[in-house]
Image (spheres, rainbow, N blue to C red):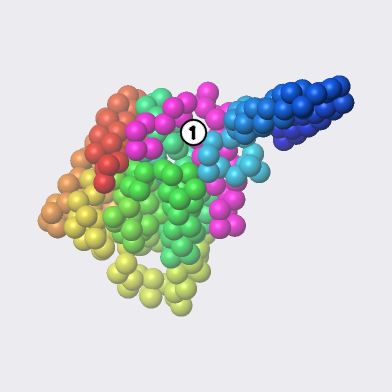
Amino acid sequence: MKPLSSLLSLFGIASRSIADSTLLHSRSVRDRTSATITLCVFALFVPSLLACSQILADDTPSGIPATAAKSEWNGFDRYDFDVDGKRVLVVTPKTAAPGRPWVWHGEFFGHKPAPDIALLKDGFHVVYMSVPDMLGSPKAVRHWNACYAAMTGDLKLANRVALVGLSRGGLYCYNWAIANPDKVACLYGDAPVCDFKSWPGGKGTGPGSPRDWKLVLDQWGFRDDAEAVAYTGNPVDNLKPLADAKVPLLHVFGDADEVVPWEENTGLIADRYPQLGGKIELIRKPGVKHHPHGLEDSTPIVEFVRKHSLEAAPR
C-alpha cells in the first residue's frame, strides 16, 4: 500500500539522518550516548506509528479479502469476492451491532431492498452467494456451507443467521437450514418455493417452468420425472429438524399466487410446522399474485428478523 510504503521510507530516511548527523558530530562519550538513547526512543514509537498507518491506508473491514471489489449500495459499502469458486457479496453496516448479526439471501438480492436497508442501519451485515440455477440442490448446500464458514470464520459474523428466501430462494434457504438447523436464527420466506414439484415441476395447479424442471433433474441427478416426483426431501416433507431447533418462520404470501401456489407451498408449511412443535407467522396479501413481493411497510419483516437475530446472537 502506498501510504504504508511511504511512511516506511520516511522512517528509514529519518532514522539514518538522526544516526548520521548525531554520530558524525559527536565529540564525546556523552554525545554518543545521547545519540543511542535518541535512536532507541525513536524505535519504540515506530511499531505504533506503523499500526496507525496500516489502519489509515486500508479501510477494508477485517476478514474481507484485500482483492474484494468495493462499491456502494444504498449508502453502504459493498464488497464482492469469491468463496468456494462462487461470487459472494457482503454489504457492511456503518457500525456492526453487538454479536455481528447478518442476513443471508437465497436469491434475488436487491429486489425490494427496504428491509435490508433498515437492518443495515441497525448494524446487520447483508450477504448473498451467487449460485443460480442450482435451486437449493445438495451442490448448492455445499457451496453455502463454505460461504457460512467464511462469514463466521473470517468475518466473525454471528453463528446463527437470518435467512431470506424470496420465491425460488426458498429452496436454497430451507434446504440449507434443514441441513444446518443450529446455525439459523430465523427464516423469512416471501412467496417461497417449498416443494420443487409445485414449482418448477408444475405438478399441482401452477404452470411450472419446463426449463427449470430440467435443472431439478440435473442438479439432483434424477433419472426421470417419476423419480423426482417420488422424492421426499423437499422442505414441505422435511421440517422436523427446524422444529426441533425451534427456528421461527415468517411467510409473506399472496393468496392468489399463480406461479408458486401458496396452498402447495406456504400452506403446507403452515399446516405441518405447528404439528411438529414449530412456530410460524403468516402475513397474507389478499388477492395478490406472485408479484409484487414484500410489503408496502416492511416493519413486520424487519422486526421479525431483528427480534430473533438479536435473541440468537449470544448463543
Q: In which quarter of the image is residue 202?
A: bottom left
Give the mark count: 1
The x and y percentages for residue 188 are 31, 42
Q: Residue at x 17, y 47 (%)?
A: 279
Residue farthest along the bottom direction in this orientation: 223
The x and y percentages for residue 197 are 36, 62
Q: Disc 1 designates what residue?
A: 92
The x and y percentages for residue 305 are 30, 36
In front of the other: 297 or 97 = 97
Left or right: 20 as drawn, with respect to 137: right
Residue 82 falls inside the magenta stretch: yes
Q: Quadrant of residue 172?
A: bottom left
Left or right: 262 as drawn, with respect to 7: left
Residue farthest along the right direction in this orientation: 24
In front of the other: 222 or 205 = 222
Q: What kind of element bears circle 1?
A: strand
Q: Which residue is drawn at 56% across and 58% down?
A: 84
Vertical relation: 273 (above or below) 191: below
Vertical relation: 178 (above or below) 259: below
Q: Give the range drawn in magenta.
A: 72-100
Can residue 3 be seen from the camera position used here?
no
Q: Residue at x 29, y 45 (%)?
A: 185
Q: Which amino acid does label 1 sit on?
A: Thr
Residue 33 falls inside the magenta stretch: no
In front of the other: 211 or 161 = 161
Q: Which residue is drawn at 56% across and 42% down?
A: 64
Question: The N terminus appears in which quarter of the rendering?
Answer: top right
In front of the other: 17 or 311 = 17
